[in-house]
Image: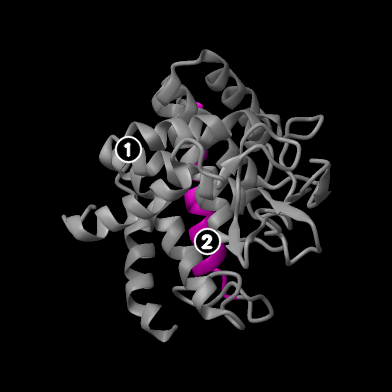
Amino acid sequence: YITGDKEAFDFASRELHRMADPGSPWIEPAHGTQAFFHNHYEKGVFTDVDGHEEGPNLLSTWKYYDRVLRLAEMYDAGGDETFRDAFLRCMPFIMSLKTETGSQPVTYDLDSHVPATGKEGSAGGLGMWIVAALTAYRLSGQETYKQEAIRAAEILNKLDWFNMFSMRCAPTARGAGWTLRANILLFEETKDSRYLEHAKRVSGGLFGYYYLNTNPHTYFSTLGFCYACGRERWESARDICENIWLQLPLLRYTVDEKIIRLIQYFRQNYLWV
């Protein structure tokens, strides 16, 4: 869509319509919800387990929130109300997913919705939850979504994005990126400068953690890559790529050399993948 490739956009839109159209079995009551966006269809059945790293029958917060957010992204790109409506149908379930403290674990049990792994709190998962809530507020005008996002931010910004449960089981650039994007959107919505300042701190922390750290006994010292650089280079590169996309809006409010250098380092090293 960004490049003007109408053929590619039309293909994506057509395929997503098969999932998002009213009556499609891809979004239907399932797993104790009014509207669940299925993960995978094979041999006549839907398979929804997407937390395979931690165990069976788990729903990964970042994987589920990500695919629901893609519906809103397609609506923003083309203005197709079908995708807006499908996204909003999925939101009541997402809003119900939170711990007693309002934090997000790494995974929930798929059917009981009880937090399963990463109960200490996933900064990346909570950042995505806030982005989903603010997106729902923008598309629906329902004030509840905005207020829930603001309350969740009080928890998010007390979590170190680089803690052990930043997204699933290790510190990730993706976790930092969603923390950043949540704070940028909160700043744009509320004009509260505290959110912008926190976004700047997370951005600087990411750069220092992955690019200025010279400790040879850690896995954060490879220019252009993040936590998986020693064993899964493709995943590591995609983490950094997603992080760059998530924090680019920060350049609207600050000329930050670290973000530019992050992009340059990534461009120099991504072919190594």
Answer few, some or many: residues within 10 Å of disc 1's Cα (few below 14, many 20 plus, some between 14 and 19): some
The residue under the point 35% across, 44% down is 74
Answer few, some or many: residues within 10 Å of disc 2's Cα (few below 14, many 20 plus, some between 14 and 19): some
- x and y percent of residue 225 in the render? 49, 73
Q: CA distance from mark 2 to mark 1?
A: 34 Å
The residue under the point 50% across, 77% down is 234
The residue under the point 45% across, 42% down is 20
**Which residue is labeled 2 in the image?**
208
Q: Amino acid at mark 1?
A: Asp
- Magenta region: 194-214
Q: Is residue 158 magenta?
A: no
Is residue 231 in view from this perspective?
Answer: yes
The residue under the point 73% across, 34% down is 98
Q: Amino acid at mark 2?
A: Gly
Q: Nearer the viewer, residue 200 or 87?
A: 87
**Which residue is labeled 1 in the image?**
76
* Kind of element beneath mark 2: helix
- 256 versus 215 height, above or below: above
- x and y percent of residue 216 in the render? 63, 81
* 240 left or right of 252 in image: right
| Magenta span main SS | helix
* 141 left or right of 9 in image: right
The total number of labels drawn is 2
Q: Nearer the viewer, residue 39 or 144?
A: 39
* 143 left or right of 152 in image: left
Looking at the image, tell me whether mark 2 or mark 1 is earlier in sequence order: 1
Q: Nearer the viewer, residue 103 or 95?
A: 95
- 148 versus 2 height, above or below: above
* Kind of element beneath mark 1: helix
Residue 164, picture quadrant: bottom right
Q: Is residue 211 magenta?
A: yes
- x and y percent of residue 141 in the render? 44, 16
